[in-house]
Amino acid sequence: MKIRLTDIIDLDVLVCTDNDLETREKMDLRTQKDREIYLQMPSTDLSEKDLIWSWYDIRKKQYEQEADKNGRPPLPGAFFSSAYRWMIYAMGILGICSGFSLAGTFLVYHGNRPVNITVFFVLFVMLPLIFTIASILLGGIRFSKRKEQRREPGRSFSHTVLNTVMFNLLPKIMKKTGLAPSGKPVEWMEDAAWNTRMKTDTYHPLFFWPFFILTSVCAAGFSLGSLGVTFFRVLVSDMAFGWQSTLITSSETVYGIVSAIALPWRFFMSEAVAFPGMAQIEGSRLVLKEGISVLATRDLVSWWPFLCMGILVYALIPRIITIFWAVQAQQKAIRQFEFLQPEYRQLILRMTSPLLDIETPEKLSDPLTETDVKLRQPENSTVRPDHATPPGMILASDRVYSAGGLETVKETLGRRYGVVTDRILFLNLNAPDVEEQCSQLDFSGVDPVVLVQEAWQPPIRGLLHSISELKKQMPAKVSLWILLTDDAGGDDLSINRENGYVSVWQRAVQTLDNPMIIVKRMMEP
């Protein structure tokens, strides 16, 4: 299947929706559903990326069927595609109107003041060309930048604009105007910014190009509008163009510059039309003390083909080429999208691990029985892992958690999250030497690193800083889990999803702006 940006948005929403479960029974059913999807795949040789996209294709069809039956809202990718298409139309119209208006105002001819072709050429040909070259250089840097050269996490301008417009501004406008698609509420769209976790470190390569295309469409519309109004003015009114300069006094110099500029189109147009000749350039030079009464009309109107072709060749066509190039660059960025986030790793693990599987009950809400469970091995599908699945590591404070409590945590990670841990190390994030402790840890060959933390302890700035320092010491592709538990002094460390501390930690960790740091909660083993 051809992967689009909307597919990545919908994939992330589906994965997050499936992970947002409250009870153990629902988590078991999720594991069973993912396993069933895996067994439906016909291919026998799948990479991890192909495995995820095959899961998405089947899971999306299931969601759409459920939406038709239960009246659930559509996935946000469809809204994003529609809204982005209308934004392209709006930016194109805005560019055309601004170009038409500005060039039309500049081309007003009063009879005694011809249009200065030097100023016109600079404004409507040279400046658009300079901006096009600058955008190509910027896009080229982004296009050729290697993954290991990407900057540290942080929001970019293009990322912030698209996030604000697509996921905050438009849904609020639709809610107030009643323009929600199919009459459905749009609260789900306001939550999409959270679900897609539009962090620059992960999504900036994807959302840079849509913003780049929008600005290029507006610039192309500007050049198209200025070209249209120039031709229209020449067609319906009497126009006069002239040049004047204090520094350049030789018509031969102007002729050389003009003939060089007209080189791209002089081969398929006659020289008399492609650009003014020597006599016409001399005849359109403005001298203040003489006025324009001594100038011939044929010389004053000889510039308009040159100006129109200049806008077309140097302003409009390069922008159109840039748009097509940006579309291809966006496809490259989408193809290079890496599924390193912890949620994707869990999804692959649920599908491919030869664990106990659950037969599908007739009704998903029915309680599970012992007869529903049996051992199932994959029959016709295998996975070709891109990276071997390493064991996890547990970090906890020995002053807080007992050895028995950490064994319970280890068992829960294996049974509920499919993470096998072979190392338990001790780390006190509140210690003054926390940075030195983190630097001495060995994270080679582990993924994920699970930091066990009491949920009641508030995520103050100092604690979040220690977590950030811990992540900096880890390899970039290794995820950090913050596993929230109940009071370590109790017998039961599990906490409910409705626990208010969970949402507090989630919001605080979100401010770290790193998708490789996620919050999990301790569940019953």
Image (cartoon, rainbow, N blue to C red):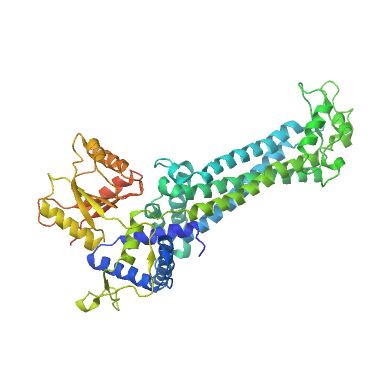
In this rendering, does residue 454 appear at all? no
> Relative to 162, is 17 on the left or the right?
left
Q: Residue at x 30, y 73 (%)?
A: 377
Q: Residue at x 20, y 34 (%)?
A: 433
In this rendering, does residue 196 appear at all? yes
Placement of the C terminus among the 4 image quadrants: bottom left
Q: Residue 485: percent from the left, percent from the top?
A: 18, 53
The front one of 497 and 189 is 497
Q: Residue 96: percent from the left, percent from the top?
A: 65, 46
- Look at the picture and state if 467 lies above or below 377: above
> Relative to 20, is 235 on the left or the right?
right
The front one of 392 and 112 is 392
The front one of 368 and 260 is 260
> Relative to 205, is 506 on the left or the right?
left
Quadrant position of residue 388: bottom left
Q: Residue at x 42, y 65 (%)?
A: 46
> Relative to 144, is 360 on the left or the right?
left
Q: Residue 419: percent from the left, percent from the top?
A: 26, 58
